[in-house]
Image (cartoon, helix red, strand yellow):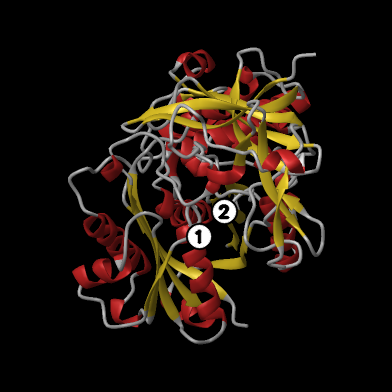
Amino acid sequence: MKGVSVIGVGMIPFGKYPDTNITDLGWPAVKAAIKDAGLDARRIQAVYSGTARGGAMVGQRIMGRLGLAGLPIINVENACSSSSSAMAQGVMAVASGAYDVVLVIGVEKLTKFGGGTLPLDEDDWEVRLGLTMPALYAMRAQRYMHDYGVSLKDVAGVSVKNRKNGVLNPDAQMRKEVTVDEVLASRMIADPFTLLQCCPTGDGAAAIILASNAVAKQLSSNPIEVRASHLTSGRFMSGFRDMTSPEITVRGARETFEESGLGPEDIDVAEVHDAFSIAELIYYEAFGFCPRGEGVALLNSGATSIGGRIPINPSGGLLAKGHPVGATGAAQVVEIVRQLRGQAGARQVEGAKVGMTHATGGGISGFDHGACSIHIFQR
Amino acid sequence: MHASMAETAQPSTSTRPFLCGDALGVNSSGRATLIGGRCADCGTETFPRVPVCASCMSENIRPQPMPHEGTLYAFSVVHVAAKKWRKPMRIGYVDLKNGARVFTHLEGADLAIGDDVEVDVGTVGDDEEGPIVSFVFKKVKR
């Protein structure tokens, strides 16, 4: 297998663009990535485009708009892991030797649904009976607080940290700091979650250009190598599941670390799937950044803040940067690449050499999640 | 328990099917029973019943009455959800004594994780066709 590097990244600021269609959300991110790479766009040999709710042929629409269609374009749907799954396909295609240069896109327009919780598939048994994504994560939070004796105030601290990071990110949807009291006083969505513990609804797009290491050396002065590219699905369990420790991410993390020969102690910065406040604490533990039950202690120690031992979600994460679901995985890669290049401005994690992204999602009966994709990058 | 299954009927006030379809049976005395599945080849019991066994891929799945009682694993009181649901909507996961986990609406404001709960019939929402009726769980009265 060939080594693979990222040679270009681009995104549009996440936010609400009700008057812009998904094609016109997508192409500026692609153009920005091409410009960032300094690439002759004709070098792109294949496109992997992820969207969860954007409809059919979104990759073709975007590439057609730029006059770059007429090559293999693969559209990927994997819920909140759509563009991280597209990324995994792109990496595999280059690693296999099939292509030298490929483009990965993530794009989503959620404002078309008019607000409220993310629409789920009513064919699903639990969804038909009334399950929503906030309710699913709320149950995780309730069980976590019960098992580990942590308070709602402790959990709300994740929102405070990530909103603080979002202030420093011009691409973030939410750019205002909040206090714990404000988080707890905001509107109740699904107990224990108030509004400020839920990621916002919004739109966005991000794009990545991948090249084989050999070609990356010719084309780029600052390639970022992909050290691990992992994709898995959840396991179906009709009975007991420990909702405080999602097997899909625990197993995905273990397999990713095995693949790369790296461990949690080697990661300098990470973007993890904080769709709701509790999720970030659970993922600290799933990745082994701290032992089970010690997520709150890790958060409160400052270790996961910018300047700490292992800064998590310096972009603001899903809670502040936003979560246009199919665009999230690609946007996480954009952030980590900028961090590893030293281009993250006021939110720069000093000296970061190894970074990780983690996007997981899909609310379906009997699974912790449908999909989970984890990537590790190194400069 | 098997004998009572023959008496299962839809709610008498309406001909509208339960939200959960035939996964809920109610006998003539009003006793609610969840009907899941049992794999005749490997013995795995699941709720709801599905056409193929996720443990051994057998399609030999028989209807199986589920235990009436279970333990509340986790729950949430939900304030934002589709218009049709009665709010606040109490929902949770119940672990039945046969190992099946059930996503369910809950009744009662005094619930806690670890509570013993039992199945009943309840109205969980309303739409243009009228009340939406399904199974619910509530605290066991001892």
User: Mark 1 highlights which residue?
Assistant: A84
In the rendered image of this protein, does residue A52 appear above or below residue A213? Answer: above
Is A257 left, or right, of B104 in this rendering? Answer: right
Q: Nearer the viewer, residue A243 or A329?
A: A243
Q: Mark 2 and mark 1 in contact (Cβ < 8 Å)?
A: yes
- Residue B98 place in picture, x, y as percent: 81, 42
Q: What's the mark number on residue B71?
A: none
Q: Residue furthest left?
A: A19
Residue drawn at 62 percent across, 64 percent down: A230
Q: Chain of mark 1?
A: A
- Confirm whether residue B21 shows in the render: yes
Q: Residue type at mark 1?
A: Ser
- Residue A192 place in picture, x, y as percent: 57, 22
The quarter of the picture where the N terminus of chain A appears is bottom right
Neighbourhood count class around disc 1 (C-alpha, 10 Å): few under 14, some 14–19, many 20 upward: many
Secondary structure, mark 2, is: strand
Neighbourhood count class around disc 2 (C-alpha, 10 Å): few under 14, some 14–19, many 20 upward: many
Q: Residue type at mark 2?
A: Thr
The quarter of the picture where the C terminus of chain A appears is bottom right
- State the image quarter where residue A374 is shown: bottom right
Is A180 left, or right, of B26 in this rendering? Answer: left
Residue drawn at 54 percent across, 52 percent down: A359
Q: Nearer the viewer, residue B140 or A148?
A: B140
Single out the mark in the foreground, 1 or 2.
Answer: 1
- Confirm whether residue A240 shows in the render: no
Secondary structure, mark 1, is: helix
Q: Nearer the viewer, residue B80 or A281?
A: B80
Is B107 left, or right, of A291 in this rendering? Answer: left
Q: What's the mark number on residue A357?
A: 2
Q: Chain of mark 2?
A: A
